[in-house]
Amino acid sequence: MTVYLNGKYLPRDAAMVSAFDRGFVFADGVYEVIRAYEGRFFGMEWHMKRLRRSLSELLIRNVEVEPLAEVSNRLLSENGLTTGDATVYIQVTRGTAPRAHIFPDSETRPTVFAAASPFEAPQHLWTDGAKAILVPEIRWARCDIKTVALVANVMASQKAKEAGAKEALFVRDGAITEGAHTNFCAVFDGVLQTAPLSNYILPGLTRKVVLEMCAEMDIPVREFPIFADQLKDADEAMILGTTTEVMPIVQIDEMMIRGGKPGPLTRKLQEAYVRRTRKALE
Ligand SMILES: Cc1ncc(COP(=O)(O)O)c(C=O)c1O
């Protein structure tokens, strides 16, 4: 496996980062995950835009984001991933410096890392739907920045796994913000509802694409908090993400949604999403 680190393409085991890297010491960094279909990235420019924003919010400067799209292409080629399903992971940290909370001096070069991996599509969960659990929101108040400080998401995801669930949904002040690695939607009387963009959720590309598709297909949308105690009235539920795509949620904790079967609106959006993401291949 060939990876990219600070301008060089290296064998995976030769890619070394200092133990004083601020990503390691403080989780002082940001990342993106981009999905490739048959060697073509979906939404690369949008991911680069979100990466620029994350860097700018954390005041991590002197990062050339533009070339990372080309780096991602080369990683697919170097790793034999120009066919089939793959992802590219990009991480940028504030760089290596003696440990101190304050920013290091302005000459410190950010660390830029990228790696491509084959992706195994969770076909059975797309078909049959998945289970989710509710967990208390314990994350910070800037979930709109895609930082590598993911320990709350890690704890929640592990809890979900141990409960036989695919996703953990965070509940803040009674309302579901989002999942540990996805955005969340529910359907009430034909209206697709999802939390509004705020500092408490990541602005997901998949969420954005789904809302655009709803507009195209005349599906009414309500960007408004979904309260956990409303879930019993939900006709359908789904989670959205770059690798998750549009995944039906058929059970939340012990509660079955729509008798445990994916609903018609979810199916419609899944099909539209597949058409949209694979369109580049036609
Ligand atoms: C916390 C969180 N919310 C939402 C998403 C979905 O974002 P996207 O659709 O851009 O992958 C992710 C993706 O990693 C995430 O980590």
Image (cartoon, helix red, strand yellow):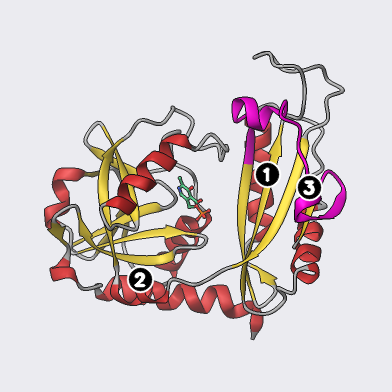
Position of residue 128 in the picture relative to residue 90 (left or right): left
- Which range of residues does the magenta coloring cover? 5-30
Count of number-bearing discs = 3
* Whole-number angstrom distance, CA of label 2 to CA of label 3: 34 Å
Residue mark closest to the camera, 2 vs 3: 3
Q: Mark 2 — residue?
A: 125
* Whole-number angstrom distance, CA of label 2 to CA of label 1: 28 Å
User: Do labels 2 and 1 touch, CB within 8 Å?
Assistant: no
* Mark 1 burial class by Cα count in 10 Å: few <14, some 14-19, many 20+: some
Q: Mark 3 — residue?
A: 15
Vertical arrangement, residue 41 with respect to residue 106, above or below: below
Of residues 90 and 223, the one nearer the viewer is 90
Vertical arrangement, residue 260 with respect to residue 63, above or below: below
* Mark 2 burial class by Cα count in 10 Å: few <14, some 14-19, many 20+: some
Indicate the secondary structure of the residue bearing disc 1: strand
Quadrant in which residue 259 is drawn: bottom left
Where, quadrant-wise, is the C terminus in this rendering?
Answer: bottom right
